[in-house]
Structure formats: C-alpha cells, structure tokens
Amino acid sequence: MNSTHKPVSRKRQILAAVIGNTLEWYDFIVYGFMTSIISKLFFPADGNEFISLLMATATFGVGFFMRPVGGVLLGIYADRKGRKAAMQLIMAIMALVSLLIACAPPYAAIGIAAPFLIVLARLLQGFATGGEYASATAFLVEAAPPHQRGLYGSWQLVGQMLAILGGAGMGALITHNLDQGQLENWGWRLPFVVGLLIAPVGLWIRRYMDETEAFVDAAQAEVSDEAPSMPAALQQNRRQILLTIGLTIPGTAAFYVLLVNMPAYVHRQFGLPLDQVFSIQMLVVAWMTLLIPLSGALSDRIGRRPLLLWPYVGLLLAVYPGFAWLAAAPGIERLLMVQLLFCTLLGLSFGPAPTAVSELFPVKVRSTGVSIGYNLAVMLFGGFAPFIVTWLSGATGSPIAPVYYLLFSTALGVVACYYLPKAEAGTQPRPDAIPVGQHPS
C-alpha cells in the first residue's frame, strides 16, 4: 500500500466504522426513548403506571447482564478472527433484534409471551453491544497514525452520539405528529422499523472494511512466537481492566441518565412537553457530536488524563446546582441551559476516553480486555441507571433524585483518573508495542 493511498484508506475505514457503529447503537438507544410507551403495552401492572415503568426500565437493564458475556465472547472472537469479522457479526445480531421488537405483539394480544419477547430482544441487544465498543475502538485506534489516535478513537463515541441524535429525531417526529392513541397503537414501532430497514446498509459497509495492519502483524507474530493463553494474558492485565472500569463509570452513568433517560424523566417529573424535550435533546447531542472529535484531537497534544480528569471534576461540581436550578422553575429554556452545561463537560471527557482505555492493552487482548472492563462498568452503572433513578424518585419524592446517582459515579471516575498514566502530549506509547501485562507510563 503506497503512502498516497493510505489517507484515503483511513478515511474509508473511519467512515465504515462510524456508520456501522451508529446503526448498531441506534436500535439500542431507541428502546430507552420508547420506554414510557413500551411499559404500558408490554408490562401492564393493574393500572399502576409506576410499577409498569419500573418493569420496563428493569428490562432495559436486563440486557446489560448479557453485555459482559457478549463482551468476552465477541472480544475473544475479535482478538482471534479480526475486528472486521466481529463487527459484521454484531451488526447481523442487531438486525435480528430490530425485527423482534418491531413485530412483537403487545400483552393484550398474546399475554405473558409479550414481555418475554421484549426480554429476549434486550438480551440479544446486550450480547451484541457488549462487543461493539471494544471492537470498534480497537479498529479505529489501530487504523490511526500514531499521533492521531485520540482523534480516531473519538469517532467511536461520535457514532454513539449520532445514534442518540437519530433516536431523538425519530422520537420528536412521531410524538409531534401522532396522537397518544396512534403512538400506542403503531407509532412506537416506527423507530425500530427504520432500524430494521437500514441494517442491511451497515452490513454492506462493514463487509468492505479492511482488517487493521496492527492486528495482522500481531497475528503473524503470534504464529512465530510463543504467546501466553488468553486467561493468562488477561490475568497479567488485571490492573488495566480495573482502571478501565473506573474510567468508564462516570461517562456511562451520565450517558444513560442525562442522554437516554432524560427526556422521559423531565416529561414525567416536570410535565415538560415530550416533543420539545426531544428537540432539546437533539440540540445538545448535536453539540456533543461536534465537541467530541475536537476533544479527542486535543488529547493528542496535551494527553488523555487532563481531558478526563477536569471534566469529571466539573460535572461533580455542577450536577447538583444544575438540577436544583431546573427543579426550582422547570421550563424548556432552563432544561436547554442545564443540558448544554452537562453535555459540554461530557463531550470533553468522551473525546479521549476510547483511546485512553484502548492504549492500556496490547493488541492481542485489546478487544477482550476493554470489553471486560467497559461492560462490567456499563452493566453495573449504566444499564440500571434509568431503573435506579426512577426508584430514587419514588422512594425519596425528590425531583432531583438523579443527582445522587451522578455524584457517586462521577466521584469514582475522578479517583480512577488519579491512576491513569501521565503520558505527555505526543509521547503515548505505541499500543501494538506494549508487552502483555506491562502498564504504559
């Protein structure tokens, strides 16, 4: 491959990873946006809307039990068969999930089988997304020039933001144009039908991705050199896995509380119009989508640690007064200001995050190691975030119940940042050169 072709090839690699990643996460996110409607149709509780909502949000979290399983199995698959093969398999599973949810009959039609179908779909979603983050991140970081890994890795989360943007756009479109009866009858299925229709595009795009040179080189080296077994390699990298968990906790808690669950929460808690709330969500997520690659690129100059630590500290200081100010006089304007503040801090931290955790691991256990740490954090602090926030609201009667959860999770992230290597700008070690078990410094 000549040098004049490499930039074009890299751009194509990024495009393939981001588009597929966006389609992958779109289906996962849409369920969170449709929770209030799905709770009525699939989880009736004798007219008790609060219990129905708890059951639906719990089902949102059930899928996260499968994430570590999917993360390990798909991570091993990606580390052995390649990033491309794993990402194609993940996309196929998500297409099946879209089909299941889009066609699922409600409780009124088939009784107890209806919630079981939703639970099955969520378990498959959890399995697939468990491998997506690490596989896509490893692919992007390994495809990047050494001095642009922060920028390239940030595109992983750009894909997730585009998924939220698409999900919020569909939510705003259907809630604005359909009445409640139409929404509950058939309108809620439209976002999943859209995901089903565009899934073949993601499959086609990922079919023509090239495997990364770093993975190919590592696979060839393993043939000639005696390599440790996967369990032994992960045991040698246990400190990196723990650090990945700590660094992931604040971002994943904030992601599901402030981005996924926020529209339903402020509509239910403060009575704000759902279509306007979705519009606000689209605006702040669009801002984050622009900010994330800028932050990722900046981390290539000043290092990953400052752009993780200081936004986490900022969120720790801002979350309580922000929610209190919104609760004092709920309104669309205040919601916009609060979400802009929170999402600016999140966007700054999201930029370097994928590359920061990816650089902790050598190539041959990168997908598996990142998958284990990332998915354990997401399962414990992300998947049940909507359930915990809903329960806290009912148990405390406080309109700012999410604050307590966010304060706890963000504080853990600040502690984890203390142990992140203090690599200087431009001197991050080549991830394909880090010996198994050696911590970069």
Image: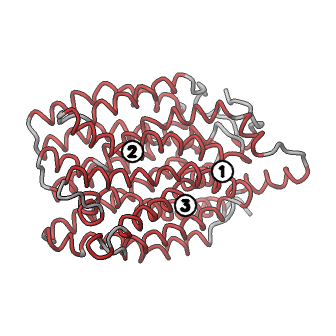
Tell me the tag on residue 17. 3
Pick the front one: 99 or 163: 99
Sequence order check: which comes first, mark 3 or mark 2? 3
Residue located 79% across and 51% down the image: 218
Q: What is the number of the mark on residue 384? A: 2
237 to the left or right of 415: right
Horizontal side of residue 119 vs 387, given as left or right? right
Given the image, on which type of amino acid does mark 2 rest? Phe
Q: Nearer the viewer, mark 2 or mark 1?
A: 2
Q: CA distance from mark 3 to mark 1?
A: 12 Å
Quarter of the figure with residue 186: bottom left
Residue 156 in percent (x, y) is at 50, 52
Whether the residues at callouts 2 and 1 have beta carbons within 8 Å, the answer is no
345 left or right of 84?
A: left
Q: Name the spot of residue 436 as percent of width and height, x first.
A: 76, 37
SS of the residue under disc 1: helix
Q: Distance from label 2 to label 1 (Cα)?
A: 32 Å
Amino acid type at mark 1 = Glu
Q: Residue at x 62, y 54 (%)?
A: 139
Say what secondary structure mark 2 lies in: loop
Q: Marks 3/2: CA distance?
A: 28 Å
- How are the colours assigned in the image? secondary structure
What quarter of the picture does the C terminus occupy? top right
Q: Earlier in the sequence, mark 2 or mark 1?
A: 1
Between circles 3 and 2, the one closer to the viewer is 2
Which amino acid, by three-letter code, is at mark 3? Answer: Ala
Q: Residue at x 35, y 56 (%)?
A: 164
